[in-house]
Amino acid sequence: MPPRLRDLTSGALALLGILTARRVFTGPRSVALGISDVCDTNCLMCWCHSPLLPRRADPANTEEISRSPRRPRFMEPALLEGIIRESHALGTFRVVLCGYGDPALHPQFDRALELMRQLKMEPYVLTNGLSLDDQRVRVWASCRAHFRFSLHAGDVETWLRVHPSGNARQFERVSRAIKSLAAAGTPRVSILHVIHRANFRQVEAMVEQARELGVKEVLFRPVRADGELAQVILDREEEIELHRELRQCLQLAAGYGLRTNLAEYLANNLHIRRGVLDTWPLYRKIPCYLGWIYGEFALDGTMTPCINSKITMGKAGEKKLQDMWFSPRYWAFRRDGRSLPQRDAPVAGCECRACPMTSYNVNIYNLLHVKLLKLGEA
């Protein structure tokens, strides 16, 4: 999709704020809304819905919590619309629709897509695609949005291993939907594969699948797992086998013209060691810029600077987004994140040692250093 004026403006103003390090010139470039705790499948490696997890009323078991009559299963529609509208007023371009379940199951999901279309914002949807029927495919095919499908398999046999409650018809229906959306040309379509013991020998099939479906972008991530889920982590010999296949598939994907993150995966394993994130060595070298570009909202509207942060800025519906974004508390987070390379410890309240947002910060760091180099040469 060609860039929009709102996209270019929000990016330029966010970059200006990062460069000056003294002001915030715009609202968050992206906001993530966790709008659903409900899922219609049970991926083997899922932290919330895996069949490997014990079925007890435990705070870590989001499936059990979401069934509780005391806890909402979806973000309230008025709250969802309010955050979108307030973000738009601040200049936000991208709205990530996500959650501990599948956001497309939210009763007002397609209405939210239409609202963002009217506001000329870009939805970024993380979905398994199981809720798509022919009518919904036609609606999504006309959206200027990014739909990222979590498949974790390049063929039906592997998909069934990863989704024990699934069936072959579901895999075929999702595949047809992805192919239709990719052929439509209006939305951006990508596929995500989390690599673990049930699928690590199928990377080539995943690349071939993307080519057959007409998708131009495929992402691969090593599994993050511990406790009961540790059994899905690859052992040392399996890791060696996987990396050999990844190197082969890097060339294969390039030959097909596919965009992938395989080079990054091979270079640093996406900072995951034995199923656990280890990002502190990275933040000893580069800052965190999230405070200028990003905000996260939980199901109840609580705003944090990122998914792993326990720093709460307030709650949408009770406080205005503008007041939270420009608050002294948010500025303190920006200041502390900017100084990470000089600090001896992570930002208080943040998981800098296990940060899932590294790609944002690495991309901005690389962009700034290329830009500064060009300015210096001029």
Image (spheres, rainbow, N blue to C red):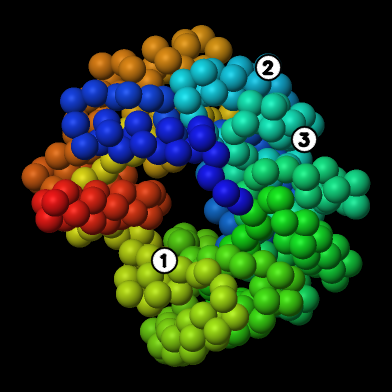
Q: CA distance from mark 2 to mark 1?
A: 38 Å
Q: Secondary structure at mark 3?
A: helix
Residue bearing mark 2: 78
Query: As shown in the figure, which amino acid type bears the numbered disc 3?
Result: Asp
- Residue 154 screen position, x and y as percent: 68, 76
- Residue 330 screen position, x and y as percent: 30, 24
* Residue 350, label in figure: none
Viewed as shown, does residue 56 lie left or right of 164?
left
Q: Is residue 247 visible?
A: yes
Residue bearing mark 3: 110
Q: Nearer the viewer, residue 211 or 304?
A: 211
Of pointers 2 and 3, the one earlier in the residue sequence: 2
**Residue at screen point 61% across, 67% down:** 216
* Residue 275, label in figure: 1
**Residue at screen point 73% across, 61% down:** 182
Q: CA distance from mark 2 to mark 3?
A: 14 Å
- Residue 210 screen position, x and y as percent: 67, 73
Query: As shown in the figure, which amino acid type bears the numbered disc 2?
Result: Ala
Query: As shown in the figure, which amino acid type bears the numbered disc 1?
Result: Gly
Of pointers 2 and 1, the one earlier in the residue sequence: 2
